[in-house]
Amino acid sequence: MTYVTAIEDAVSKIKNNLLRRGDLFPHIKNGDSSEKHYVWRENTDWIEGFYTGMVWLSYEYTGDTFFRDAAVRQIDDFRRRLDGNVSLNHHDIGFLYCPSALAGWIVEGSEEARRLALDAADKLLERWRPKGQYIQAWGPEGDPENGGRIIIDCLMNLPLLFWASEQTGELKYKEIAVKHADLSRRYLVRGDDSSYHTFYFDQEDGKPVRGGTHQGFHDGSTWTRGQAWGIYGFALCYRYTGNPLYLETSKRLARYFIERMPEDHVVYWDFDVTQGEGTYRDSSASAIATCGMLELLEHLEQLGQGDQEYNDIRDAVQRTMQSLYENYSTRDQPEAEGILQHGSYYVRGNLGPDDYIIWGDYYYLEALLRMEKGIPGYWYERG
């Protein structure tokens, strides 16, 4: 199946959003409603990098400098945000600065973008907690609720540190990324290949306390987006380190994900929630997992591992992308702001439980371009 039509539809919607909304960024609205749209405001959350990443992907696909100029303006805003330390007391620095600043370096060779990405990596290092040997997810150091918390999402922030180590030759970035990845592999991945969303450690001595969740169904359930972050995150850790344990972990998480896909191959928001007509999906989780599986397939091809497991992963990618395009995209809605329908942000908190989700849009477009044009996104340098 060719996805040119899907790509061109997405690029058209991104251009329309830029023309209508200027330099504002899309945010997810509170609550569920029949009217699906983004809330447009300034660059103050953890999600804005995905929008800039979509603009860069559009530029790479079209060569239209309209997109390039918009992406550069947005990068300037990310510089303003970093210099002003605006809402950066969290670990999602990679989500913000890989698809924006690092993308500007990858696509344009911009030294300003490279410098910004390196400065962002230094900002992420401020989250390192030597006592526990982990990167703290949220909040200030010593916070009674979050001071000892890691979450599986952080695996997708580690590429910024791995890249910074390659760029500067300074091992501290890679060493911290590896320590955090190893800790995540040990405590966030369960023995049955499912995953915890979050894990708590004692802030004083670093001893493990318990696994849990923040956005999943319950502490012992498997939040589908968390599982997807793990698939992609460990595959990228393997790319940067060559450690076969990371590759094996990505495969295990992918196998669990694939075996629990529903009939239309797009997952619900948690694998353990009761599935029925009114149960929310999370198309963004399926888009992320697809990108992770594409990354995984590339490594398996290079290793010559074209076995049944490889075929199962490839087939899951194809089935999921076809379903996302045919059943979840806004291909028949030219005025829609979003590209994928039926994403879920935080179901129990009633935040975007069934709406457009900007990272879902980004990873869907990344997967389309990787499959159709060999453009893999902005988590590592190419070539």
Image: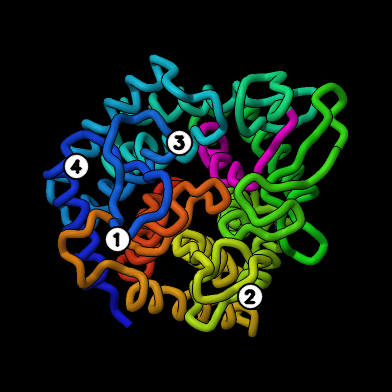
Disc on the earlier residue, 4 or 3: 3
Marks 4 & 1, CB-CB < 8 Å contact: no
Residue 68's tag is 4
Q: How many marks?
A: 4
Tell me where residue 283 appears, x and y as whole percent.
Answer: 45, 64
Query: Is the C-beta separation of discs 4 and 3 under 8 Å?
Result: no
Which residue is drawn at the image coordinates 35% and 38% (left, top)? 100
- What residue is rendered at 41% in x and 47% in y? 378
Up-down: is 7 above or below 100? below
Q: Within 10 angstroms of label 1, few (less than 14), some, or many (20 or more) residues?
A: many
Asked if residue 128 is among those painted magenta in the image, a careful observer would answer no
Residue 155 in magenta? yes
Residue 211: horizontal and vertical position, in percent? 78, 46
Q: Which residue is mark 2?
A: 260
Q: Which residues are magenta?
A: 148-165
Mark positioned earlier in the residue sequence (2 or 1): 2
